[in-house]
Image (cartoon, helix red, strand yellow):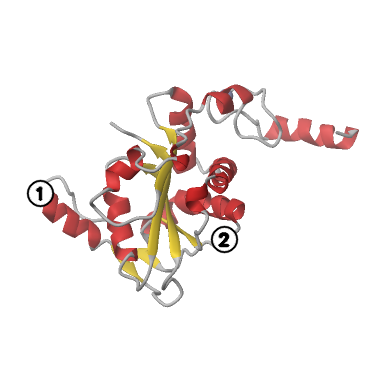
């Protein structure tokens, strides 16, 4: 690092404090949003290497898929909670890019995601995206796509406005309601392609299932699913 660069970094640090997105420590690499300790402690699942992993068990029998995975266990562990909050609401785009790139590199090392043709981020409906300024799934998708060297297609499936409160409906009504939340805008481009649908978190899998089953209406589409975090409670 030359003198000018280190002076520039020192000034940047003064005006834009560069702190770890996990623990708030200010001792971290210049090009990282997380300190080395947090990076080391984020709980990776390793699911991408194995079929019939817990994420695949969520979707088994609910929709046909090629492979499904999630990168981190989402627990009450403080660092990852801070990380996800900053990704979703804190506008920390660089963090999304860093996590997406790490996830993408893991997917690239796995044999199970070799035939992906394009990445599809879970759409947000327009009003929410305007309010937030970005879609965290798109942020992740772009970096994952960079690692896998495939395009991001964020224009083939869209999401309609938020549904009224779901809690009073039974499971079947909820499911119909969810499925109606997504529609295909372009079924030419994606026909006969293997799509990787990306979201930030998988819990019950209901939203991913609804969006995925709509994507599967495109002729010849094969579907895989990847979420950054797996929350099993
Ligand atoms: Zn940290």
Q: Earlier in the sequence, mark 1 or mark 2?
A: 2
Dot 1: element: loop
Q: At x 65% / y 35%, what residue is drawn? A: 32
**Which quadrant of the figure shows ligand 1?**
top right
Q: At x 71% / y 30%, what residue is drawn? A: 14
> Taking 146 as reference, is 14 above or below it?
above
**In the displayed structure image, the side of residue 164 where residue 96 appears, left or right:** right
Q: Is residue 155 visible?
A: yes
Residue 150 - label: 2
Quadrant for the C terminus in the image: top left
Q: At x 73% / y 35%, what residue is drawn? A: 12
Dot 2: element: loop
Q: Residues within 10 Å of mark 2 (few under 14, many from 20)?
A: some
Residue 169 location in percent, x, y?
Answer: 11, 50
In the foreground, 83 or 128 = 83
Residue 65 location in percent, x, y?
Answer: 34, 55
> Taking 189 as reference, is 121 above or below it?
above
Residue 211 - label: none
Which image quadrant is residue 201 in? Answer: top left
Q: Is residue 135 visible?
A: no
For label 1, the residue is 170
Q: Disc 1 and disc 2: Cα gap in Å?
A: 39 Å
Quadrant for the N terminus in the image: top right
> Taking 231 as reference, is 101 above or below it?
below
């Amino acid at each position: 690092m030359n003198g000018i660069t280190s002076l520039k970094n020192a000034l940047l640090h003064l005006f834009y404090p560069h702190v770890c997105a996990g623990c708030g420590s200010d001792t971290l690499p210049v090009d990282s949003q997380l300190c080395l300790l947090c990076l080391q402690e984020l709980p990776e699942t390793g699911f991408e290497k194995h079929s019939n992993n817990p994420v695949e068990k969520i979707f088994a029998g609910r929709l046909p898929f090629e492979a499904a995975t999630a990168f981190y266990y989402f627990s009450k562990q403080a660092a990852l909670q801070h990380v996800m909050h900053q990704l979703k609401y804190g506008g920390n785009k660089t963090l999304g890019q860093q996590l997406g790139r790490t996830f993408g590199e893991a997917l690239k090392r796995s044999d199970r995601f070799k035939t992906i043709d394009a990445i599809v981020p879970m759409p947000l409906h327009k009003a929410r995206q305007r309010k937030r300024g970005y879609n965290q799934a798109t942020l992740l998708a772009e970096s994952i796509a960079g690692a896998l060297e495939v395009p991001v297609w964020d224009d083939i499936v869209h999401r309609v406005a938020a549904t009224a409160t779901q809690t009073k409906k039974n499971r079947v009504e909820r499911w119909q309601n969810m499925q109606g939340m997504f529609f295909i805008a372009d079924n030419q481009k994606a026909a006969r392609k293997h799509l990787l649908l990306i979201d930030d978190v998988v819990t019950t899998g209901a939203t991913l299932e609804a969006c995925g089953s709509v994507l599967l209406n495109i002729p010849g589409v094969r579907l895989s699913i990847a979420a950054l975090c797996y929350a099993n409670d």
